[in-house]
Image (cartoon, rainbow, N blue to C red):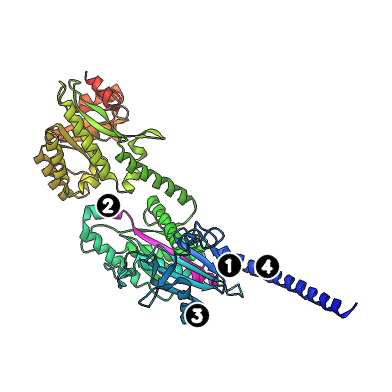
Amino acid sequence: MNGDNIILVVIISVLVIGMIGLTYWYYQKSENVLEELKLFNKEKEYYSEAMIVLSSDYSVIFANRLARTLFSLDKKLKNIDDSSKIKLKVDTDNSIEFFEALELEFDKHGDSFHLKNVLLDIDNKMKQVNIYVNKSVWNKEETITCIIDMQTISSNVIGTQKDGRIDFFTGLPSQFSALTDINTKVMQSHNSSKSFALFLFGIDHFKDLQATLGLGFSNQIIRKMANYFETKKDSGISIYRMDCDKFLIVIENILDDGDIREIAKEMILDISSFSTKENIVSISSSVGIVKYPQDGENALKLINHVYLSQAQAAKESRSNIRFFTTEYQTYNKDTIKMIEEIRSGLKNNQFLLYYQPIFSIKNENMVGVETLIRWEHPELGLLTADKFLDVAKQAGLMVDIGEYVFKEAILQRKKWNTFTLPRFQITLNLSLEEMQVDDLIKRLEVLFQENNVNPKDFNLDITEDAALANVEKTAMDFKLFSELGLSISLDHFASGHTSLKDLQTLPISTIKLDRALIFDLASSINHQKIVKAIIVLAHALEIEVVAEGVETSKELSFLHSFGCDYAQGYLYARPLPVEEFQELLG
């Protein structure tokens, strides 16, 4: 073999070895990158955050959907619009190209840093964001992972950093601080393989407390909660006020579920010992708990999940503790879906009024009618109120539904006034939430005037529990209703704790006996005695009595013998749509 052939063989061998080495290097790099992406390659986890992975020369290796949109990249990570350049403004007066700015920040901060409340310049429009940057601990080629938190408060920022990081009412860090700090902990915990837990505390039945006892009382409780949690802060515990009555506690270096539960239990017991100036009510709280990384791999997901678990805890019982499970997600999705469908139903007039007649027991003449709401659901068909009112209450839609019912009933009364029908009173149910509306009386007055309908043709039906939640306020409201011309009935009477004094104080014209006293009236001597005593007492106070849910002639016979004034129930008629009710009227 001559010299030239030897040289050629050597060159080919070197090239082959080089190709093998390059292939192996590329394989190793790919493996490292794939290992890097195991943490982040979950676009559903980062649906509100742009995530991009870069090589050491700032070439794009990976970008999730939001990052591809933001940086104008196609699925092969090629730039599809050279004119669209993202810029970043950190500490300078001017924005500079995004990747150039990152390189400058690496020079300042080193391998891992967090840029808080910096400005992205997108086509000359500023958006305030948080950016988390970290060099891979696995990849020797210094792969860079960059997450842009798009959930940060965004606006056309004009040189100010007043970003709501402190809750002004309590002085604690706010929910916006929580998002930022928890994402930072995610980065730190991932690099160190440590875990942490989130506790979300909420006051049980807070809205009811606020509605019945007033803003001053609820503010007292919020401040006490904030002061208490402030005493719990240390190097491993962070406290945030989220919204309304919700407080978030982040605890680092957690052990097992038993230890977590004990910490939560201790805090619940401490909160239950709170006292107020008035000492008129006991306070309890329920807590939801999530753990990183098993319950979510970014701040938004963890916070969403801890809210779900807290809601489930509060729903089940007072002073309750619940760890997050995936079954809560299904429940929450169904609830959210129904809430949106209720809103759509109100907008598209899918709700109907049914009418159940009320008869005089003495002469069997119809004297009134109770309106009952139904939902003509586009997929599920006709739904009774028990299928959707609890969800509506959770979503704060009771006032909207009540307003819908009032408008429909008043319009229907206006139509009936054009017919030659016997006069009868329409009973409308009024919820606790509606009673808290400041201008309810004015709204009703306007509706009656606009439709030229007499308020005396209407009766307001208010449950005993709602009326007694704040007797002094209820008495004032009832007086205003009466002055407008409305009569008032107390519904579900004897299911709560109405006193003789309450009956004398409240200007009511009728009480409605709860169905629980009626259904076994023929067989329960105790119920017979109770019903008879209530009727005698009511008549002594010049209050009439309606028996609800009368279904048998035996029940009616007893009620007649006790002197009960009116009855409604399936014995007389089921709730009827308007056309069938009009046929009944003849």
Residue in view at x 60 percent, y 74 percent? 141
Asked whether disc 3 touches disc 4, contact meaning CB atoms under 8 Å apart, the reply is no
Say which amino acid is labelled 2.
Asp
Of callouts 3 and 1, which one flags the residue occurring earlier in the amino acid sequence? 1
**Contact flag, marks 3 and 2 (Cβ < 8 Å):** no
> Which of label 3 and label 2 is nearer to you?
3
Q: In the drawing, does residue 220 fall left or right of residue 88?
A: left
| Label 3 close to label 1 by CB (< 8 Å) | no
**Residue at label 3?**
110
Q: Earlier in the sequence, mark 2 or mark 4?
A: 4
Amino acid type, callout 1 = Glu
Please state which of residues 109 and 169 is positioned toward the viewer in this rendering: 109
Name the residue carrying label 2.
208
Side of 462 relative to 55 (left or right): left
Q: State the extent of the magenta-drawn residues as a range.
A: 186-209
Mark 1 = which residue? Answer: 36
Query: What's the residue type where badge 4 is placed?
Result: Tyr
Residue at coordinates 40% horizontally, 68% vertically from top-left? 120
First in sequence: mark 1 vs mark 2? 1
Q: Nearer the viewer, mark 1 or mark 2?
A: 1
Q: Disc 3 versus disc 4: distance between alpha carbons?
A: 27 Å
Q: What is the distance, in whole Å, between disc 2 and disc 4 at their CAs?
A: 62 Å
* Disc number placed over residue 27 in the picture, else none: 4
Residue 493: percent from left, percent from top:
23, 38
Q: Is residue 114 left or right of 466 when viewed as pictured?
A: right
From the viewer's perspective, is the residue at label 1 or at label 4 nearer? 4
Q: Position of residue 91 (x, y in %)?
A: 38, 78
Q: Residues within 10 Å of mark 2 (few under 14, many from 20)?
A: some
Position of 360 relative to 212 (above/below): above
Which marked residue is nearer to the observer: mark 2 or mark 4? 4
Question: Mark 1 near mark 4, Cβ–Cβ under 8 Å?
Answer: no
